[in-house]
Image: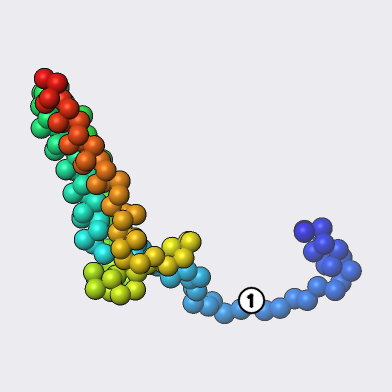
């Protein structure tokens, strides 16, 4: 690329123009730090993960598990807390959808629009399965003991 430019300059075909005035910085992408889902779905997801820890921690109550459980809680809170803070940064003008808007419009994904029911199932399936798994393990441990 620079070789071509040097050839143009050497042939005398290059134009010299005045420096343009300083233009206002134009951002190509709107600063949308919102994830598009209602806050209630994130709260339900966090509740599911923490509920699993409560079930397992209660079923296998042992002082040795206190530190690992505390670390898991910190990771879950950080994993959802940091993005929650990120959505509140300066310059973010978007708001999360309300449950009514979510039910009416759904959400657009890479594979197409999802209804509120389908998106809720996709978001909450892992936390719900974890709670059910934790309850199953707790029941099995209680029956065996």
Of 23 and 83, nearer the camera is 83
What is the residue that sits farthest to the top in this orientation? 145
Q: Say which quadrant the N terminus sits in.
A: bottom right
> Residue 97, relative to residue 119: is it above or below?
below
User: What x and y, as percent, mark residue 58?
Assistant: 10, 32
Instruction: Name the residue rendered at 47%, 69% in the picture.
Output: 29
Task: Count residues near mark 1 (Cα–Cα under 10 Å), then give few for <14, some for 14-19, many for 20+.
Answer: few
For residue 105, say whether it is visible.
Answer: yes
Residue under circle 1?
19
Looking at the rendered structure, the secondary structure element under dot 1 is loop
Q: Answer with the quarter of the image where residue 89 lies.
A: bottom left
Q: How many marks?
A: 1
Q: Is residue 108 left or right of residue 144?
A: right
Q: Is residue 50 left or right of residue 129?
A: left
Of 41 and 68, nearer the camera is 41
What is the residue that sits farthest to the right in this orientation? 11
Instruction: Name the residue rendered at 34%, 73% in the picture.
Output: 105
User: What x and y, as percent, mark residue 98?
Assistant: 24, 71
> Residue 41, relative to residue 132: is it above or below?
below
Instruction: Name the residue rendered at 39%, 65% in the picture.
Output: 114
Of 76 and 3, nearer the camera is 76
Q: How is the image coloured?
A: rainbow
Of 97 and 112, nearer the camera is 112
Q: Say which quadrant the C terminus sits in.
A: top left
Instruction: Name the residue rendered at 82%, 62% in the picture.
Output: 4
């Amino acid at each position: 690329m620079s070789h071509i430019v040097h050839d143009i300059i050497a042939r005398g075909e290059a134009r010299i123009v005045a420096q343009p005035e300083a233009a206002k910085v134009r951002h190509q992408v709107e600063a949308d730090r919102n994830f598009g889902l209602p806050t209630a779905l994130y709260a339900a997801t966090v509740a599911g993960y923490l509920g699993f820890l409560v079930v397992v921690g209660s079923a296998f109550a042992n002082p040795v598990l206190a530190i690992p459980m505390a670390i898991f809680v910190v990771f879950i809170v950080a994993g959802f807390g940091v993005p929650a803070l990120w959505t509140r940064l300066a310059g973010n003008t978007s708001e999360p959808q309300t449950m009514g808007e979510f039910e009416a419009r759904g959400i657009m994904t890479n594979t197409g629009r999802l209804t509120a029911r389908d998106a809720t199932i996709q978001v909450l399936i892992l936390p719900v399965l974890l709670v059910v798994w934790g309850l199953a393990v707790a029941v099995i441990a209680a029956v065996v003991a």
